[in-house]
Amino acid sequence: SVFFLGGDLLYSRVTVAKLDTLITLFIGFSLFRRWFFGLLQSILGASIFWGLSVTTPFALPYWHGFIYNLGELPGAILVGLGLVACARRPHLAAFYWGLAAWHTKPSYFPVAVLLILASASSIPGVLHDKARRLATLTAMFVLPLAMWLMFAATRFGIADAANQFRSIVGFLGVQSSSHQSFMPLNQLSKIGNPLSFSHLISRLNDPHLEWSMSYISFGTKLKAVALSLGSVGITLAGLASQRPADRRAFTTLASGALSVMVLAYTYWWFMLHPTMWMRHFQPAIYIGFGLWVFWLLQISLRFSLFDRPLFRWGAIAFATTFVVWQAYFSWGISTRISDFPTERRCPIDSFVLVNTVEMTCKKD
């Protein structure tokens, strides 16, 4: 819609940055309100967690800022949006998960599939009812892909739409040679013992992998491990400490599914990934961050932290600082848009499709 209103690629990036922020704050706000926090407490709480995730020294690893628009971030946000919607609108949640899987990064595909299985399995009823729910959720999951392919066929032609579909299938590892080096099964066949500790140590000390690069600080490494493996630990502890009356089938199944995916991403990245590029570890980091937030909120409810004046005023101060910083950052970007080089400003008529998540600007 940005392009049809006369904008270009730069305006699109600014718009996506705004949407990322607003949707994330909405997710946090919804979680707080669902657990009976007040309106002000919910706004402040959501701002605190989002502010922590993007502000040094607590910023998530590989954070390049909103305008960079890496697909891993909106993918994680859409997964979270689906989790918020799933309790009351499971089919809408499946649609959000489809957006994450088909239109952000294919690495979220297994996450979406496991969450759909968890949603279908958690409803009461016999196996027939669960199978029917699974079928309808799957249809909603595929809908974003079908909508995009129809748009691509109309706007860019059937041949380009067909190339899009082949590219998607290739990203998922089916009949693709260009992505084989990143496929877990392909890498497993090369290392012999899949649990070799010596193999892990050699990779951590390999100067050719990004983990060993000088710009990946010890703090960044520590955060990467804490957000991934640490999130699994706090999830297991949270599930074990829940009272039977507080347990919900979907919460248990979804937490287990997300923990399994964090472990899978972590194993793939540390043991198999050919470059250990930090960007490719972001799905584990973002999902792990979400698990940390969810279970920390559970702890805050148990100990009534938001009812304590020191904690409440500290939260207000942090949230106010974050809002001021965000406003300054956004205003600075908006006043300098006209100064950006023209090669970064691509009108929609010059777009060339690469795949469902990437486009490039046609050169004259």
Image: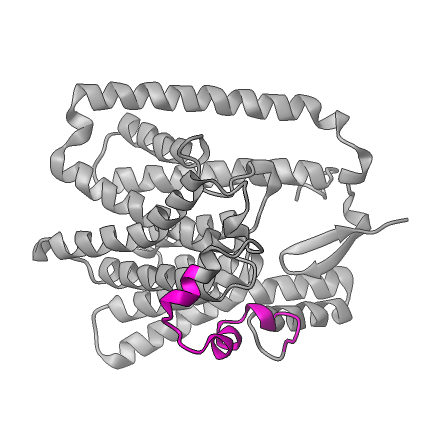
Which of the two residues, 364 or 59, is positioned nearer the viewer here? 59
| Residue at the image point whose x is 18% and y is 41% from the top | 299
Q: Residue 87's spot in the image, x, y percent?
A: 29, 55
Question: Does residue 254 lie above or below 309 as drawn?
Answer: below
For the question of whether residue 81 can be seen, the reply is no
Q: Residue 172's spot in the image, x, y percent?
A: 55, 71
Question: Does residue 311 lie above or below 23 as drawn?
Answer: above
Q: Residue 338's spot in the image, x, y percent?
A: 75, 26
| Residue at the image point whose x is 70% and y is 23% from the top | 336
| Residue at the image point whose x is 25% and y is 67% from the top | 122
Which of the two residues, 290 or 231, is positioned nearer the viewer here? 231
Which stretch is magenta? 176-201
Q: Residue 298's spot in the image, x, y percent?
A: 20, 43
From this viewpoint, which residue is outermost toward the left? 244
The image quarter containing residue 344 is top right
Task: Report how many numbered discs are placed on residues in the image.
Answer: 0
Q: On the picture, is 205 further left or further right than 251?
A: right
> Is 196 one of the magenta-colored residues?
yes
The image quarter containing residue 130 is bottom left
From this viewpoint, which residue is outermost toward the right? 364
> Is 255 one of the magenta-colored residues?
no
